[in-house]
Image: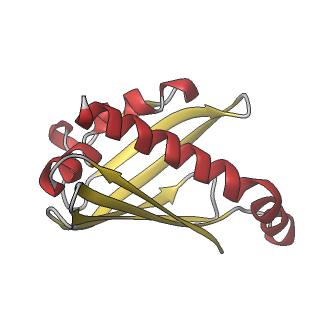
């Protein structure tokens, strides 16, 4: 499995960063470059324990669908999401929020595996890990910009 960890300090309280990270609309805005939309939104329009969502996006010019579930919600400290179905062999994203002298330290740990066995592992090592890291970092920059304006 491939993995990376990103950390970013955001000048906002942990409760605000936590809430913004669970906002489906903000997620869609942050991923507009990839034409990301919600095909199936979470019930009530907000993520809660066990909420599912189906995303549609374009990466490498190819349309993808990914259905995920949100779980282990512990406001304002942590939550996780994982792929139920979609392009990855496996995908888990842990979001952690800690107090920091300048606001909140947000840490993302993403663990994933591309399909197709040895070929997928090679793709992950050569290309996909860095592509995913940049994509999550882009989302985090948009989240920080929204909270710090």
From this viewpoint, is residue 27 visible? no
Report the quarter where the C terminus lies. Answer: top left
Classify residue 23 as left or right of residue 121.
left
Quarter occupied by the N terminus? bottom right
Vertical order, 87 against 27 (above or below): below
Instruction: Give residue 59's position: percent from left, percent from top.
Output: 66, 35
Which sits in the foreground, 63 or 142?
A: 142
Quarter of the rendering containing residue 57: top right
Q: Is residue 44 left or right of residue 28?
A: left
- 131 is higher (above) or lower (below) than 138: below
Image position of 6 (left or right of 124) = left
At x 48% / y 59%, what residue is drawn?
83
In the rendered image, residue 54, in percent from the top left (x then y), is placed at 42, 42
Please give the name of the residue rendered at 78% of the width and 65% of the height, measured from the top-left corner.
125
Q: Quadrant of residue 120?
A: bottom right
- Residue 142 lies, with reference to residue 112, above or below; the image says above
Q: In the image, is residue 40 above or below residue 111?
A: above
The answer to whether any part of residue 124 appears in the image is yes
Taking 8 as reference, is 132 left or right?
Answer: right
Q: Residue at x 34, y 39 (%)?
A: 143
């Amino acid at each position: 499995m491939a993995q990376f960890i990103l950390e970013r300090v955001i000048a906002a309280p942990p409760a605000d960063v936590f809430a913004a990270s669970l906002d489906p609309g903000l997620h869609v805005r942050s991923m507009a470059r990839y034409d990301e939309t919600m095909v199936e939104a979470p019930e009530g329009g907000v993520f809660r324990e066990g909420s599912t969502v189906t995303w549609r996006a374009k990466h490498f010019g190819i349309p993808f669908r990914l259905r995920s579930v949100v779980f282990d919600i512990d406001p304002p400290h942590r939550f996780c999401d994982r792929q139920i179905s979609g392009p990855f062999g496996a995908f888990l994203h842990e979001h952690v929020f800690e107090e920091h002298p300048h606001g909140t330290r947000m840490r993302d740990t993403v663990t994933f595996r591309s399909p197709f066995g040895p070929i997928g592992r090679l793709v992950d090592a050569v290309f996909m890990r860095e592509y995913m890291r940049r994509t999550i970092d882009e989302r985090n920059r948009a989240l920080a910009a929204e909270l710090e304006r």
